[in-house]
C-alpha cells in the first residue's frame, strides 16, 4: 500500500493515499461497480460519463467504496492499482474475472442458439428424400462402412458450431436447399 508522510505528522507515521486526498480513512469497503457512459447524440462516440474522485480522470467503470467513517467515493481501476493496496487490488481482480466470465457465458449461449437454429434448418432439409438418398449413396469421408448421411447426422448431434456449419455445407453441396 502506498502511503504518504505529511510534514505535520510525527516522524514514521503514514496514511493511505486516498485518506490524504480527503476520501476518508481505511479500511475501505467495496460497494459496487458502475458503468457510466455519455453519448451526446445517436451515432456520436460513446465517452466516459464519470470521473475519479482521487485524480479527476474520466471514467467509464467506476469502483465505488465506503471509508471507515461512511464517506463514499468512486475511483478508477488504475488509481486502485497505483495505491499498492492488495485488498483493493483483489477487488479489481474479482470484478474483472466476473465480467470476463459473464462475457464468455454470453458467447457460449449465442453460439448454442445459433447452432440450434442451423440444426432446425438442416432437419427440414433432411426431410427431402432426394437429399437423404444422395447422402446415403456416398461414403463417409473417413470410415468406409458408414455413409455421408451418417457423417452429417453425427456432426449435427455431436459437433460444435463448426461441425454444424460443415454439415450445412455438405447438405447444400448435395442439393439440400438451406435458407
Image: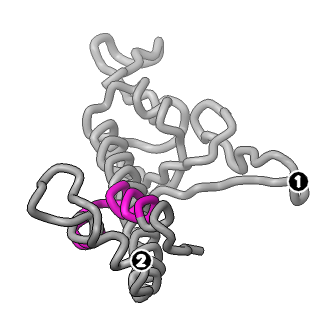
Left or right, residue 35 beside residue 87: right
Question: Considering the image in quadrants, where does the C terminus appear?
Answer: bottom right
Coloring applied to the structure = one colour
Q: Is residue 169 magenta?
A: yes
Q: Which residues are magenta?
A: 153-170
Instruction: Answer with left or right where residue 16 lies relative to residue 7.
Output: left
Quick one: quadrant of the N terminus? top left
**Which disc, if any, is residue 139?**
none
Q: Which residue is mark 2?
A: 131
| Rendered image quadrant of residue 98 | bottom left
In the picture shown, does residue 100 fall above or below 110?
above
Q: In this picture, is 45 found above or below 36?
A: above
Place of residue 91 in the rendered image (x, y in percent of width and height, measured from the top left):
32, 46
User: In terms of image quadrants, where is residue 81?
Assistant: top left
According to the image, label 1 marks what residue? 40
Q: Closer to the camera, 2 or 9? A: 2
Secondary structure mostly seen in the magenta stretch:
helix
Determine the residue positioned at 46% across, 69% down. 114
Quadrant housing residue 70: bottom left
Name the residue: 44% across, 86% down: 128
Horizontal and vertical percent for residue 53? Answer: 60, 41
79 or 98, which lies in front? 98
Q: Is residue 106 left or right of residue 11?
A: right
Whether 36 is among the magenta residues is no
Q: 147 and 36: which one is in front?
A: 147
The answer to whether residue 99 is seen in the rendering is yes
Amino acid at each position: 500500500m502506498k502511503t504518504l508522510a505529511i510534514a505535520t505528522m510525527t516522524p514514521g507515521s503514514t496514511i493511505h493515499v486516498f485518506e490524504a486526498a480527503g476520501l476518508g480513512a481505511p479500511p475501505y469497503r467495496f460497494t459496487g461497480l458502475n458503468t457510466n457512459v455519455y453519448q451526446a447524440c445517436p451515432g456520436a462516440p460513446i465517452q466516459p460519463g464519470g470521473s475519479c474522485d482521487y485524480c479527476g480522470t474520466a471514467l467509464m467503470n467506476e469502483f465505488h467504496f465506503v471509508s471507515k467513517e461512511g464517506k463514499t467515493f468512486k475511483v478508477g481501476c488504475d488509481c486502485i492499482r497505483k495505491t499498492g493496496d492488495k485488498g483493493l487490488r483483489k477487488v479489481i481482480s474479482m470484478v474483472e474475472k466476473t465480467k470476463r466470465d459473464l462475457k464468455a457465458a454470453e458467447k457460449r449461449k449465442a453460439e448454442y442458439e445459433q447452432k440450434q437454429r442451423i440444426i432446425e434448418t438442416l432437419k427440414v432439409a433432411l426431410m427431402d428424400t432426394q437429399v437423404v438418398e444422395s447422402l446415403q449413396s456416398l461414403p463417409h469421408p473417413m470410415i468406409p462402412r458408414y455413409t455421408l448421411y451418417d457423417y452429417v447426422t453425427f456432426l449435427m448431434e455431436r459437433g460444435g458450431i463448426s461441425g454444424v456449419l460443415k454439415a450445412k455445407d455438405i447438405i447444400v453441396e448435395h442439393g439440400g436447399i438451406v435458407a
